[in-house]
Amino acid sequence: MTRWRLFRSLFVLLLTGVMTSACADPKNTATIRYRVIVTVEVDGRLVEGTSVMEMSYTRFERRSLLGMGGSATLKGEAVVLDLNGRGTLFVLPVQQDWTGSLSEVYQGCVLASFGVHSSIGSLKPSDLRHLRAAKGRVPLFIFTKKYGVPVFATFHDESNPSSIYEVDPDHLEDAFGSGVRLKRIDLEVTDAPLTHVLAQRLPWLKNPLAIKWDRDPPGHLRPERDRPLGFKITDAQFFGNGSR
């Protein structure tokens, strides 16, 4: 075994031990189950799409050799919202950052929405107690125009995954016609079962290895920010990082 491989193995064992220790101590964890509620106005009438998700946070002890840190695991799937004959909106549990890359969206937004202003890596025991006691319905906290906004998408043909395209949440009428606009996104604490409807609506998600996504050919790669959604999305972006 090379020196680098030995170091890497020791590091992984150390990290696993720290995480296992943190998870074993209830004061270092908090789990919150919540319903994502997307409300859209269609021709003057409000329609809602919902998905029940569960977020688990783990705080690593300061006294660990790795210092402070934390993790967040999301169980859940995209919101499916049928717009009264205008089409179907899918609100994915990911966001696009300034580079155009896709990343998890709810980890930080759930904290801020329920009044926790620490980052995942700097959670305190009091923050976790606050999350465990959270109740009620609150607006989704969106940090900036870009950060904290879930990706809105639809399909030209739902049977063809490569026909997916992004929808501007501020201009839903561009995809679904006049009279369609986003009203709000809320989170509501619940003990309802997790939502499992997406694979029935999009059966090709059951066989991710067979999905034919559009991709740039070798040697003609574009920056992430210049790629349409269908050229960078995978089946994983329809689910939380702890769902599959």
Image (spheres, grey):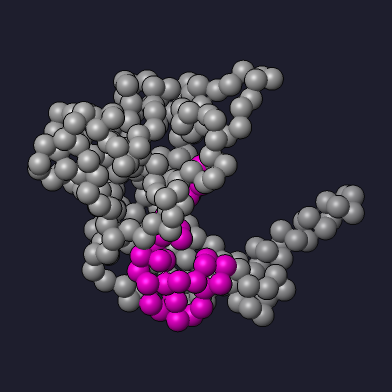
Label count reads 0
Q: Is 146 left or right of 134, judged from the image as shown?
A: right
Residue name at image x 72 percent, y 73 percent = 65
Which region shows up in magenta?
Answer: 102-131
Looking at the image, is 90 positioned above or below residue 123? above
As drawn, 16 above or below 130: above
User: Which of these two is toward me, 44 or 50?
Assistant: 44
Residue at (88% x, 50% y) in the render: 1
Residue 56 can be seen, yes or no: yes
What residue lies at 90% left-to-right and 50% top-to-bottom?
A: 2
Locate residue 20, reporting x and y percent.
Answer: 59, 67
Look at the image and say whether residue 113 sits in the magenta stretch. Answer: yes
Residue sitting at x 52%, y 67%: 119
62 lies left or right of 166: right
Q: Does the rendering let one see residue 244?
A: no
Task: Please identify the quarter of the rendering in which residue 22 is found.
Answer: bottom right
Tell me which corner region of the image, top left, top right, bottom left or bottom right, holds residue 59.
bottom right
Q: Which of the 4 quarters of the picture holds residue 142?
A: bottom left
Q: Main secondary structure of the magenta part?
A: helix
Residue 70 lies left or right of residue 208; in this view the side is right
State the image coordinates of residue 30 (x, y, percent, origin top left). 43, 70
**On the picture, is 62 further left or further right than 142?**
right
Q: Where residue 96 appears, x then y in whole percent?
A: 48, 43
Spot occupied by residue 190 in the image (x, y as percentages of width and height):
25, 63
Residue 161 in the magenta stretch? The answer is: no
Observer-nearest of 144 and 201: 144
